[in-house]
Image (tube, rainbow, N blue to C red):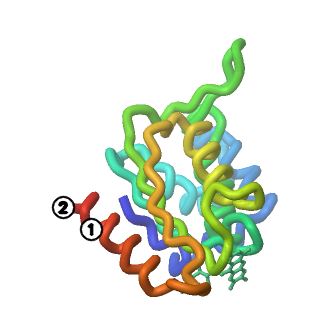
Amino acid sequence: MITQAASAPSPSIRKVSAERFAANLTPAAERTPEQVWLAAFADDLIAELQAADTIVIASPIYNFGPPAVLKAWADLVARAGTTFQYTASGPEGLLKGKKAYIAIASGGMPMGSDYDFMSRWLTFFLGFLGITDVEIIAADGIMGAGGEEKIAAAKDAALKIAA
Ligand SMILES: Cc1cc2nc3c(=O)[nH]c(=O)nc-3n(C[C@H](O)[C@H](O)[C@H](O)COP(=O)(O)O)c2cc1C
């Protein structure tokens, strides 16, 4: 599954709002016509996730964490009762049996460092949805010394996985 979230058409993932979040939380049969429209984009993103066996997310790190568009995607696909549920023993992810590959690029910071909140957050978030089989392809520190080699190594790693 590859979602081109950053270039998504309108209604855009870029415009996550309290209204859309409320629409997402309203059961489908109870939504107003406006809420149906507001929730439709999230419905599509969730359906895409549910249908996928393999999920590929490629993203840069912005200010130690995810770019706003990736955070917006997460806010839209995390829907209680659909992609996760609350149980007596805590939340349970409902998207099980999937494999995720996440390719993360950073200008300078090393993946897994104390100030890398991106890979930790994304791995945790996917696990929250039940996607616990996550493999990271790191293209970190690509703006520093040896950047071109790091990009080439990440491409090689991705091509090996795809083969
Ligand atoms: C707004 C912004 C914030 C960024 N913040 C970080 C950061 O916190 N740490 C880091 O190592 N790189 C940071 N970068 C560099 C990006 O991670 C880097 O440009 C990206 O991974 C490479 O993709 P690109 O070739 O599309 O720019 C930032 C870049 C932008 C534009």
Secondary structure of the residue carrying numbered label 2: loop
Secondary structure of the residue carrying numbered label 1: helix
Alpha carbon separation for disc pair 2 and 1: 6 Å
Quarter containing the C terminus: bottom left
Query: Where does residue 85 sit, x and y in percent of width and height?
Result: 63, 28
Residue topped by disc 1: 159
Residue 141 or 10: which is nearer the viewer? Answer: 141
Mark 2 within 8 Å of ligand 1, using the beta carbon: no
Report crowding for label 1: few under 14, some 14 to 19, many 20 or more residues within 10 A (C-alpha). Answer: few
Mark 1 within 8 Å of ligand 1, using the beta carbon: no
Residue 139 or 68: which is nearer the viewer? Answer: 139
Amino acid type at image mark 2? Ala
What label does residue 93 carry, if any? none
Query: Where does residue 108 sit, x and y in percent of width and height?
Result: 66, 77
Query: Where does residue 51 sit, x and y in percent of width and height?
Result: 35, 46
* Residue in view at x 55 percent, y 59 percent: 40
Amino acid type at image mark 1? Leu
What label does residue 163 carry, if any? 2
* Residue in view at x 52 percent, y 76 percent: 8
Say which quarter of the image contains residue 149.
bottom left
Circles 2 and 1: CB distance less than 8 Å?
yes
